[in-house]
Image (cartoon, grey):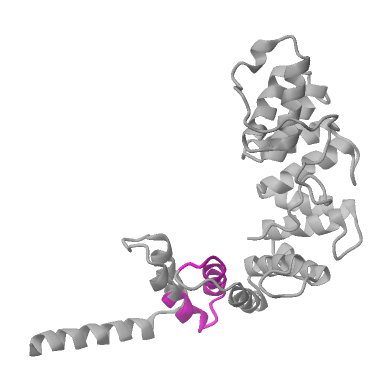
Amino acid sequence: MKIFKCMLLLLWAVQINVFSQATPDRMFETGEDYFTGGNGKTQDYEMAVKWYLKAAAKNNANAMIRLAECYEEGYGVEKDERKGVEYEKKAAALGNPKAQCWLGNSYATAYGGVEQDYAEAVMWYRKSAEQGYAQGQYCLGNMYYYGKGVNKDYGEALKWYGKAAEQGDDKAQAMLGQMYLVGEGVGMSYAQALKWSQKAAEQGNADAQYLLGVIFESGNGVTSFLEDAIKWYAKAAEQGHQEAIKRLEKLKNESDEDYLFDSLGESPLDFGIENMDIMGVDSNDDGTGVRDDIPVKK
C-alpha cells in the first residue's frame, strides 16, 4: 500500500514538474495532440482545453484562438460564443492574424454578443490582411466590394482578392474570375476570368464552377463547348448551386443533343424559377451578391 501511495506521489510530482517546465509553445502543442489525436495521444477535447488554458495563461495566442474555437463550437467545454469572442479579442490584441480575422467576422456579423460594427470589422480585417493572412485579405476585399464599413471600391477589392487568390484562396479566386469577366474595377479579360475561375473551380468552389459553365457556354475567351459548360454546371449543381441547376434544366429543354445530359440523372431540386440572367444571383442571396458570405465566419 505504501509503495502504491509512493508511486502516486511520484506520478503527481512528475506531472507538476512537466507543467512547470513546459514552455507555452509546448503546452499548446500538447493541447493540439489531444485535440487532433496526434503523436500517440487519444483524442480528448477536455484534456486539450486544459493544455490550451495553461498556454493561454502565458500569453500564447495560438492557444487563445483554439480556445475561441472550443468555446464557440463546444469542444471539451460548454458552448459559449461570448467567451469564444473574448479569446478572439485577447489573441487579436497580441497580433495573431487568424484571431484578427475571426474578430473582424464577429463584428461584421454581430456574433458572440458584440454589436455589429462594419468599421471595426474592417479595422481588424486590415490588420490581418496586412500580415498576409489570406482569409483576412479575402474578407477585406469583400468589405470593399460590397461597401461595408468603407466606401465601395472595386479597385481595392480587386487588390485584396488578388493577394488572397495568389495564396490559393478559392473564394477570392472565384471573385477575381467574376470581376475580370464583367469588368469590375479592371478591364474585361476573358483570359484572366478563365484562369481564376478554373483555379477556384478545381478546388470545388461552386460559384467558380458555375462561372466556368457560363464562360464555356457563351464562348467568351474560349471556343464554345456545350459539353464542357454542362460538365461545370453539373459540378456546381451537385453542390446545390441554384443558378447552375436552372441553367442545366434550361439547356436540357432547349438542346436536341440529349446524349449530353445522359450522365446527369434527375435532380431532386425545384427548377421552377425562369428567365435567369446569365450572370444571375443565387436564389439564396440576401442582397449582397452571388457570394453573400460577408464575411466568412471561421
* Marker count (numbered): 0
Of residue 199 and residue 142, the one placed in the foreground of this image is 142
**Residue at left offset 84%, top offset 42%:** 179
Quarter of the figure with residue 173: top right
Residue 225 visible (yes or no): no
Of residue 82 and residue 40, the one placed in the foreground of this image is 82
Residue 200 image point, x, y percent: 68, 40
Quarter of the figure with residue 248: top right
Q: Is residue 122 left or right of residue 187?
A: left
Which residue in the rendered view is the most extreme toward the top? 256
Q: Is residue 76 left or right of residue 288?
A: left
Of residue 44 and residue 27, the one placed in the foreground of this image is 44
Q: Is residue 168 left or right of residue 137?
A: left
**Residue at left offset 30%, top offset 82%:** 15
The stretch drawn in magenta includes residue 68: yes
The relative height of residue 50 versus residue 33 in the rendered view (above or below) is below
**Residue at left offset 43%, top offset 64%:** 35
**Residue at left offset 82%, top offset 25%:** 221
The relative height of residue 149 versus residue 260 in the rendered view (above or below) is below
Our reading of the magenta stretch's main secondary structure is helix
Residue 279 image point, x, y percent: 84, 35
The relative height of residue 237 versus residue 172 in the rendered view (above or below) is above
Residue 236 image point, x, y percent: 67, 34
Q: Is residue 161 left or right of residue 5?
A: right
| Stretch in magenta | 50-75
Of residue 280 and residue 161, the one placed in the foreground of this image is 280
The stretch drawn in magenta includes residue 114: no
Rendered-image quadrant of the C terminus: bottom right
